[in-house]
Image: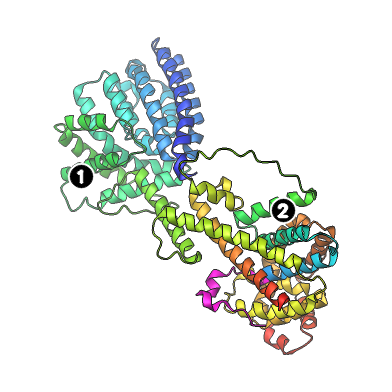
Amino acid sequence: MEPKSCSGDGNPSRNLHPSKPLMAANFLRCLSRIQQTATNSSVGSRSRRIRRAAYASMAYSAGHRRAWSWALLRKLRCRRVRPVILPRRPRIARPQVVIEIDRAEVLRKLVPGGTGMDYCRLLEETADYIRCLATQVRLMQTVTDSISS
Amino acid sequence: MNSGSSDRTPGCFLNQNWERSVDHISQFGSFMSPQSSSELERGLQRLDHLTEEILPQSHFMDSSGNSQALGGLVIAGNRALAHLDQFPADPGFAARAARFSSFDGQSYGWFSGHFELPGSGKPSTAAIIQSLTASGLQIGHLECNRQIPVSDGLQSKMNSAGPAISREETSLSDPISASNAKKRKAPSRSREKGAASPKPSTDPPKVADEEDSDTKRCRSSEKTHEIGIDNVKPKLEQNDGARSNGNDEQKQRKEGNDKPCEPPKDYIHVRARRGQATDSHSLAERVRREKISQRMKLLQDLVPGCSKVTGKAVMLDEIINYVQSLQRQVEFLSMKLATVNPQLDFDNLVNLHAKDMIQLCGSLPNSAAYSSEMSMVSSYADVPQQRGILHCIATNGMDFHCAVNMLDTTGHQDLNAHQASLGGFGDPSSQQGFFWEDDLQNIVQMGIGQDQEIVASSHNLHGGTSQAAQMKIEL
């Protein structure tokens, strides 16, 4: 298996989140747990759990200094208290009358915890969130590659 | 607060309160006609209530909202205080007026510094009115000019003194309003600095004119915060003749006030650039804009393929697309992982992956947080399958001594925080949470000042290999 090095991406240490090993350890631990405990469940539920584990390990390794990780952890914690996944309310399709897209609003919806922030802070959180997400994606990529090889 | 909509929402919010406060003050004004000191006391009490009401808002909102509040108070207050010259000297008046001045130290600091006893009659009224209008507002100027029955000389003095007084005030206001919003103060401080720097080079009247025209210019450039700009300019130009008289006074007053007050040191220092507006609004906005552009540059580096893109809108679009694509990738990869054959041997996987991880994070900085996290990771070695990872991670050249120290000092807070969050962390399976807490207990046991334990465990971890020698652990 070819070792994955990200030197082709430019400066690797800048784009990687500093807590990558912790993230990796967390995620792998979650993965192994999922593998051991949920062999009967469907692919969909397993994938959802893996996704949640990915976000959780990401948020956990980012720590409590970041607003987005804090919001993510809180959201996950609430989910955990009520493990039943609430059925999604069917969305009434409203006619798109949007003339001008408020990009800051869109970004706020994407980044967890972004609704209560001013624009300046939002950009900062987005930067950290992107770093973490990119690290997580790379991590998962290597895992899948190493599994499939 | 959001940049786009914040100008509107606080303004509307504040306008309602402003109307309410104006109503209060107009009642207060009608109250004043009987001219009894007790009524003055009551009226000033109501003013105090209003200032207390509006003061938190002025902290909360940006300076545009604040200026509107000041304008409202100024309008009504002028009407009320026109009657003041007929009052006998009131011992409580000075105290109350001083408290009133603390509403916005920026504007009223001068007021508190120059307040004369009401016994002197008209000059005190003039002082009060001058200070009230000296918040540098057009509204204040307009209303004051129209409503107060003062002499022409006084009026011209007020008009010309207004823009410059707003600068002098800052020197006095610093000790008074140290608790006020820092951001509002810093621009006015730098305004003083910026105004003081050209002073030695040019003649005083010219400088004053420059400052006045500067304020005029900056007012005209400020589109969002100012009202009635067209009315202001003719008013200011009317009094050009009387300006030279006012300028000398301003200069003397400014130099007199500069010396006793030392500017406090805990503000954001902003220097007004040459040829740019020195208004507090624009300076604060400039600071904000610079912050935002700094963050956008950061983001530009993170998002691949954004180096050529210029313009905030396109950049934001790219960022949004990138975040969405990353999130989609996470979903896709999790789906892929879920479909993988569950009989795979995860131990080997972990070991393989550890090697990749080392290559990936080869040149990571050795930060303190990193160290504490690494030490936490090292505790996971209880599970044998993780030993492979730790072995590989350790070869990364971590200073384990540093990690041990961090664990003692900072690890506690981190661990406690993490432990609190781990109650509901991760998988919905209850095993998961329990597992985390077990590990944390181990860490905490290790971390509570037991260096030798850590050394021993680390020796166990690495099986007494040469890694331990590299660890530089000191007892």
User: Callout 1: few (<14), some (14-19), or many (20+) C-alpha neighbours within 10 Å?
Assistant: some
Residue B474 as seen in the image, left or right of residue B154:
right
Q: Disc 1 vs disc 2: which is toward the camera? A: 2
Q: Position of residue B320 (x, y in %)?
A: 52, 55
Judge whether A65 appears above or below B144 on screen.
below
Instruction: Classify the position of the C terminus of chain A by image quarter.
Output: bottom right
**Crowd tier of the residue under label 2, counting other residues whose Cα lies within 10 Å: few below 14, some 14–19, many 20 or above:** many
Q: Please indicate whether residue B194 sits to the left or right of residue A12 in the image.
A: left
Q: At 22% from the left edge and 26% from the top edge, which residue is drawn?
A: B154
Is A123 placed left or right of A29 in the picture?
Answer: left
For label 1, the residue is: B210
- First to last magenta residue range: A1-22
Label 2: element kind: helix
In which quarter of the view is residue A23 placed?
bottom right
- The chain that hosts pointer 1 is B
Q: Disc 2 designates what residue?
A: A76
Label 1 to label 2: alpha-carbon separation:
59 Å
Q: Is residue B252 visible?
A: no
Q: Is residue A16 visible?
A: yes
* Quadrant for the N terminus of chain A in the image: bottom right
**Which residue sits at x=41%, y=61%?**
B309
At x 26% / y 18%, what residue is drawn? B149
Q: Chain of mark 2?
A: A
